[in-house]
Image: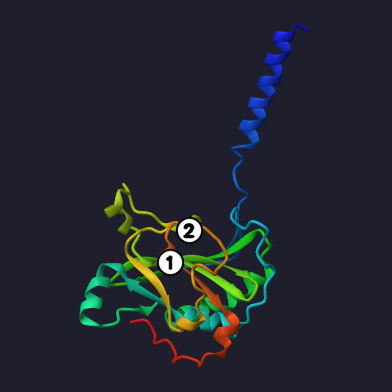
């Protein structure tokens, strides 16, 4: 065979191989639960490095305390809160939402693989707000539970103020924030939060919406007051 032709065939084969494997689509998520307003799925995590500590056992009580301790602080009102001294943190989940999500998320961690993370998606609707979305994900690493709250009662149209041309429903992308500037996340028991410099490395588009909770330290904290029902 002509050497030039041979090199051309080899080069063509390599280019085809790269196009097939370099641009391969990620595997579809594993859906563990879905109804008209809630979806719990396992997504392959390309940032898992050596792997998360999955399957993981996070008890229903622990998960309930974690969800009940999450607080959202509006970023638009942050400066005002510094001036007035008034706390603006609000519970991320109502008591009904915690009761619906906690057992499903606890079970999902027992079924997750080391290269997967658990995601959640929940729709919220009332006459005053209309349709809003809460979504995010979590994974376990040793005694730590890493929680990402991408959206919290966020309107699908909120992203249109930030160069989106249409409204966005993240049911298939639960870790994508609809609005990049609407809120940040805090925890009701600050001593149970692992400092950013000590938590497992996991890149995210908004560091203000990811928390690492030390479950052992949380267990030693006094139990907070129950989360009030949503208005």
Q: Position of residue 165 (x, y in %)?
A: 31, 47
Please say if the residues under marks 1 and 2 sit with CB atoms less than 8 Å apart: yes
Q: Nearer the viewer, residue 41 or 175?
A: 175
Above-or-below relation of 96 to 15: below
Q: Quadrant of the C terminus?
A: bottom left
Residue on which the image places disc 2: 204
Figure disc tally: 2
Q: Quadrant of residue 105?
A: bottom right
Quadrant where the N terminus lies? top right
For the view shown, which residue lies furthest in the top direction? 2
Identify the residue shown where x is 55% and y is 84%: 218
Using a 10 Å C-alpha cutoff, classify the residue at mark 2 as few (fewer than 14 neighbours), some (14 to 19) or many (20 or more): some
Closer to the chain start, of discs 1 and 2, is 2
Image location (x, y in percent) of residue 2? 75, 6
Q: With 222 as the anchor, is 126 left or right in this view?
A: left
Q: Residue at x 65, y 64 (%)?
A: 52
Q: Secondary structure at mark 2?
A: loop
Q: Which mark is residue 209?
A: 1
Circle on res. 81: none
């Amino acid at each position: 065979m002509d050497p030039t032709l041979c090199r051309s065939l080899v080069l063509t084969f390599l280019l085809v191989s790269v196009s097939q494997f370099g641009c391969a689509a990620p595997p579809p998520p594993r859906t563990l639960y879905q109804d008209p307003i809630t979806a719990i799925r396992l997504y392959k995590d390309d940032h898992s490095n050596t792997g998360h500590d999955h399957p993981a056992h996070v008890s229903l009580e622990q998960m309930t305390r974690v969800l009940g301790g999450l607080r959202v602080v509006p970023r638009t009102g942050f400066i005002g809160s510094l001036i007035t001294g008034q706390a603006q943190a609000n519970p991320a989940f109502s008591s009904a939402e915690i009761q619906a999500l906690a057992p499903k998320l606890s079970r999902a961690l027992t079924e997750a693989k080391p290269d997967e993370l658990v995601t959640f998606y929940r729709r919220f609707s009332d006459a005053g707000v209309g349709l809003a979305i809460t979504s995010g994900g979590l994974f376990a690493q040793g005694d730590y539970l890493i929680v990402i709250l991408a959206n919290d009662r966020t309107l699908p149209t909120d992203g249109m103020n930030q160069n989106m041309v249409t409204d966005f429903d993240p049911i298939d992308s639960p870790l994508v924030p609809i609005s990049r500037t609407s809120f940040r996340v805090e925890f009701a028991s600050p001593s149970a939060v692992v400092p950013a410099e000590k938590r497992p490395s996991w890149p995210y588009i908004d560091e203000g919406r990811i928390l690492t909770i030390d479950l052992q330290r949380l267990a030693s904290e006094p139990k907070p007051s129950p989360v009030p029902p949503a208005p």
